[in-house]
Amino acid sequence: MVDVTPKEPTHRRALARCKVMMAPETTAKVASNAITKGDVLGAARIAGIQAAKKTPDLIPMCRPLLVGGIHVNFTIGDNFVEVEVQVETVDRTGVEMEALTACTVAALTIYDMCKSADRSMSVGELALWEKTGGSVGTWRRPAL
């Protein structure tokens, strides 16, 4: 494990996104809260928050952090639900893995809750979109 002891704690933030692709009928059911398993986005939000907090238990060499804030948001499109997660801390190392893990688990929760309505779903486009803090400073994914 890399020694971060000499580093000074700084405010750090990471933003990750991914998409759950699905049939338009499924996105309509998610939007109207008509999925039989219950509140899809509510469950996915809680799952994402829990996942961010448990990241060091899942990813080898990922160090435990005091996570200051976790925000899980969703955008519903015609044939997808986009998951966006922002994680913040004041620590010696970044929260990129926490944001990416939270994003993935929230997307998998959407998949799990909707699978009886739509077996054709897929999860993809997982990426870090922005990070701030630390010696690198601010990094943003370039627009395509």
Image (cartoon, rainbow, N blue to C red):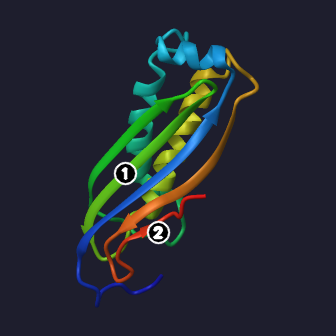
Between the C-alphas of marks 2 and 1, the distance is: 18 Å
**What residue is shown with label 2?**
62
The vertical placement of 104 against 73, above or below, is: below
The vertical placement of 109 against 103, above or below, is: above
Residue type of the residue flagged with mark 1: Gln
**What residue is shown with label 1?**
86
Are the residues tagged 2 and 1 within 8 Å (C-beta)? Answer: no
User: Residue 138 — which label?
Assistant: none
The residue located at (56%, 14%) in the rendering is: 28
Residue type of the residue flagged with mark 2: Cys
Which corner quadrant holds the C terminus? bottom right
Give the secondary structure at mark 1.
strand
- Determine which quarter of the picture holds residue 121: top right
Sequence-wise, the earlier of marks 2 and 1 is 2
x then y, percent, for residue 9: 23, 77
The residue located at (24%, 74%) in the rendering is: 10
Give the secondary structure at mark 2.
loop
* Mark 2 surroundings: few (<14), some (14-19) or many (≥20) residues within 10 A: some
The vertical placement of 31 against 102, above or below, is: above
The residue located at (30%, 86%) in the rendering is: 5
From this viewpoint, which residue is outermost toward the front?
Answer: 144
Q: Left or right: 69 with respect to 76?
A: left
State which mark lies toward you, 2 or 1.
Answer: 1
Q: Left or right: 28 with respect to 96?
A: right
x then y, percent, for residue 57: 47, 58
x then y, percent, for residue 59: 53, 62
x then y, percent, for residue 48: 43, 42
Q: Left or right: 128 with respect to 66?
A: right
In depth, the one of 5 and 137 nearer the eye is 137
